[in-house]
Image (tube, grey):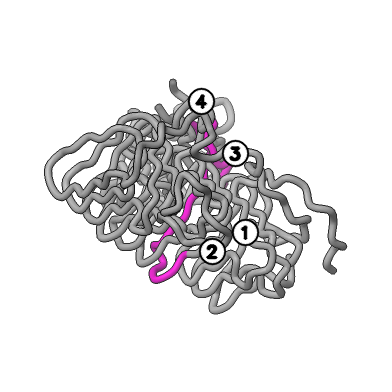
Amino acid sequence: MVLAVASALAWVVTGPAAPARAATTCTASLCVLNASAADALYVHPGSIQVTGSILVDSTNSQAALVSGSTSVISNGGTIGGPAAPAGFATSSGGSYSPAPTNQAAGTDPYAALAQCPAASACPTTPAAPYPTVNHVTGNQTISAGVYTSISNLGGTLTLNPGTYVVTGATGLTVSGGKLNGTGVTIYLACPSYPTACAAGTSGAAFTDQSGGKSSLSAPTTGAFAGFSVIADRNNTAGVSVTGSGTWITGGGLLYTAAGKLTAASGGKASFTGAVVDSVETSGSNSSQITVIPTTGTLAISVPASAGLGAAAPGGTLSAALGSVTVSDGRGLATSTWTATVTATNFTTGSGTSAETITTSNVSYWSGPATNTNGTVTATPGESSSSSAQSLSSARTAFSSTGNGNNSTAWTPTLVVTVPAAAVHGTYTGTITHSVA
């Protein structure tokens, strides 16, 4: 599939708070369910970036806090809750985009979801004690079932499709190794399993740390279709990712109604949707939580038009085109794409030779990524002005390799050398970005 979006370019050659409302089911991409906690959403520092809306149910006078040169961003949605806007605090340069608005609290959208062992997607419960897996090196593959704990301290641990119920306090731990699974749901239970967790019990957690890399895709059919991680509704142990180069890419939904989702010290967590008790990033500006719903599409957005300024014949002008963003919502376990840029000649008047600036006089450099979401390695085609390329032929603007849903943005620069013979006029042309 190839998507192309064009930007038309031109230059001139010259010389109070709303009342509370009744709660309804939360439909936001990120639902934070704790009804009373201070800092139920807490960024100090790091970032939370969501495609869609963010709803924080807490009525606390400081329901949310963004501290430091950090941000909470909703792309194409809203940020809010019953405590907004006054209860959504910032300090030391923190920000929300868009500005929080007063909204009714939302109820748990999965309150009726059958849990293990009752749900049809759950494995048969064997006699206790349940097995443990402690993978240290090399490659190992395991099958769905009920486990006391699963840990991977090195090498690659692969999960066959199905539901993995983890019951012990050690839970599922990835520390320095890789965890891969297609068509997988992780179910975080308690030591009392198959009896449900008692209210307020800290049971199995999902912990990724010390360079661990977890890449999961959710089942597409069955009772847990679309879910990467489900926790018993009373399990307060959450999901955490800690350390630079550490990530959890859940190619599905995260549901932990009593647990916290945490990214710390440069860790990154990405899901297609999240319903959590609370959410926090800390320890580094690169700590990131991303929620990008699966759309099944690969899309690119560009500025509709841009003015590049003015220059005299024989002169040179350089100007930023504006932000270009590729959004990959295909939900692939491994996703790659390449964005290409092309150009037309730029003309004025009737387009005679003296009224034309050809593409050989127009150069392009992409520069570094200005923003990335999800688990993605994005590579610019032209990282700096010294590597600018003429648009006399198609050029690679950016390429990417990632896991799950992700997005990459950059702000390219055009450099135009105006021919000495160019006549006065307003020259227009088209720069086209495509992605495949």
Q: Which residue is mark 2?
A: 71
Q: Which of the two marks, 3 or 4, is nearer to us in this view?
A: 4
Which of the two residues, 406 or 235, is positioned nearer the viewer here?
235
Circle 1: element type: strand
Q: Residues within 10 Å of mark 1 (few under 14, many from 20)?
A: some
Residue 313 % position (x, y): 44, 46
Task: Identify the residue at image location x=58%, y=37%.
Answer: 114
What distance separates the C-alpha of mark 3 from that of mark 4?
43 Å
Is residue 306 covered in magenta? yes
What is the three-letter code of the residue carrying label 4?
Gly
Q: Are marks 1 and 3 in contact (CB under 8 Å)?
A: no
Q: Which residue is mark 1?
A: 97
Q: Residue furthest right?
A: 19
What is the three-letter code of the residue carrying label 3?
Ala
Q: Residues within 10 Å of mark 3 (few under 14, many from 20)?
A: few
Magenta segment: 281-307
Q: Does label 4 or label 1 sit earlier along the sequence?
A: 1
Residue 77 % position (x, y): 66, 48
What distance separates the C-alpha of mark 4 from that of mark 2?
37 Å
What is the three-letter code of the residue carrying label 1?
Ser
Q: Residue furthest bottom?
A: 92
Q: Does label 3 or label 2 sit earlier along the sequence?
A: 2
Q: What is the number of the mark on residue 222?
A: 4
Left/right placement of residue 116 relative to residue 167 reads right
Q: Are marks 1 and 2 in contact (CB under 8 Å)?
A: yes
What distance separates the C-alpha of mark 1 from that of mark 2?
8 Å
Task: Identify the residue at image location x=25%, y=35%.
Answer: 142
